[in-house]
Amino acid sequence: MKRPSVPTGIAAAILLVLLLTAGGQLPRSAWAQSLVADLSNHLIAINTGFVGTEVVLFGAIDGPGDVAVVVQGPPSEVMVRRKSRIAGIWINAASMEFQQAPSFYSVATNRPLDQIVGDAVLARHEIGLSHLRLIAAQSSRAAPERVREFREALIRNKQELGLYGTAHGQVAFLGERLFRTNVYFPANVPTGAYTVSVFLIRDGDVVSAQTTPLAVSKVGFSAEIFEFAVRQSTLYGISAIIFAVAAGWLAGAIFRKV
């Protein structure tokens, strides 16, 4: 499926090109910081026709360096279950709960991570899936090998849903100081408050960082239905049953006449 176009992203790209053609110079107030970055859109609106979208991140640095971009969705508790076949039937035989696992995670860099910085720095800033801190509720009682197996299963499940990146995105430099990258959000992206962290890396260490908020929210009629289902769950359930019965009766009446 072709990803939807992002007019605001095109506008951001044009802005970067104009800055580049102007000699890559920014106002002195902007260069007071080593790193400046922003998003083409700070709100992703999910409606009934939402099929996924892209957001453009663009920025500038004050000199040579590498850039890493990490996008994390709102954290939540995730239960990972392992199925086993017993007496010919597949059942849940074991499980492990992870606390504060990001609902969405993606990384973009201008070069491969192993060519930019060491594992200690990557782990400190949670750059890359292998360095993402996923804390198991039973980690104090479970063997490290067991925790590792369930951790890998959690990441694999998220990747199959398109919520964890299977590969690093590409940060593209326009000249020596201006950069941009596209972050894709699938149709099933969870709602909530996201953080977009940009890291400037030099000489094997992070020398500057900036975090920008991003909101993913339902809008329109679908948002009203969701809000009604959450706030009035009992009434929503009764309404759903009544609607299903009415629809079944109407369909039966139509086919009887035919």
Image (cartoon, helix red, strand yellow):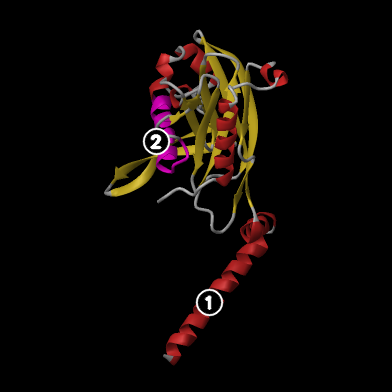
Task: Residue at 42% x, 38% y: name it.
Answer: 159
Q: Quadrant of residue 81?
A: top left
Looking at the image, which is closer to me, 167 or 16? Answer: 16
Q: From this viewpoint, is residue 197 visible?
A: no
Name the quarter where the C terminus is drawn: bottom left
Q: Which residues are magenta?
A: 146-164
Looking at the image, which is closer to me, 13 or 117? Answer: 13
Could you tell which of marks 2 and 1 lies nearer the N-terminus?
Answer: 2
Looking at the image, which is closer to me, 224 or 114? Answer: 114
Please state the total of marks drawn on the protein image: 2
State the image coordinates of residue 207 (x, y, percent, origin top left). Answer: 59, 12
Spatial CA span between label 2 and label 1: 39 Å
State the image coordinates of residue 98 (x, y, percent, origin top left). Answer: 51, 32
Q: Amino acid at mark 1?
A: Ala
Q: Which residue is mark 2?
A: 156
Disc 2 to disc 1: CB gap under 8 Å: no
Please tell me whether mark 1 sits on a helix, a strand or a loop. Answer: helix
Whether residue 54 is in magenta: the answer is: no
Whether residue 147 is in magenta: the answer is: yes
Task: Residue at 60% x, 38% y: name it.
Answer: 40
Alpha-carbon neighbours of circle 2 within 10 Å: few (<14), some, or many (≥20)? Answer: some
Task: Residue at 50% x, 7% y: name it.
Answer: 203
Alpha-carbon neighbours of circle 1 within 10 Å: few (<14), some, or many (≥20)? Answer: few
Secondary structure mostly taken by the magenta-highlighted segment of the chain: helix
Find residue 135 and name its label.
none
Please tell me whether mark 2 sits on a helix, a strand or a loop. Answer: helix
- Farthest residue, direction bottom: 257
Task: Residue at 41% x, 31% y: name it.
Answer: 150
Q: From this viewpoint, is residue 47 visible?
A: yes
Q: Which residue is mark 1?
A: 247
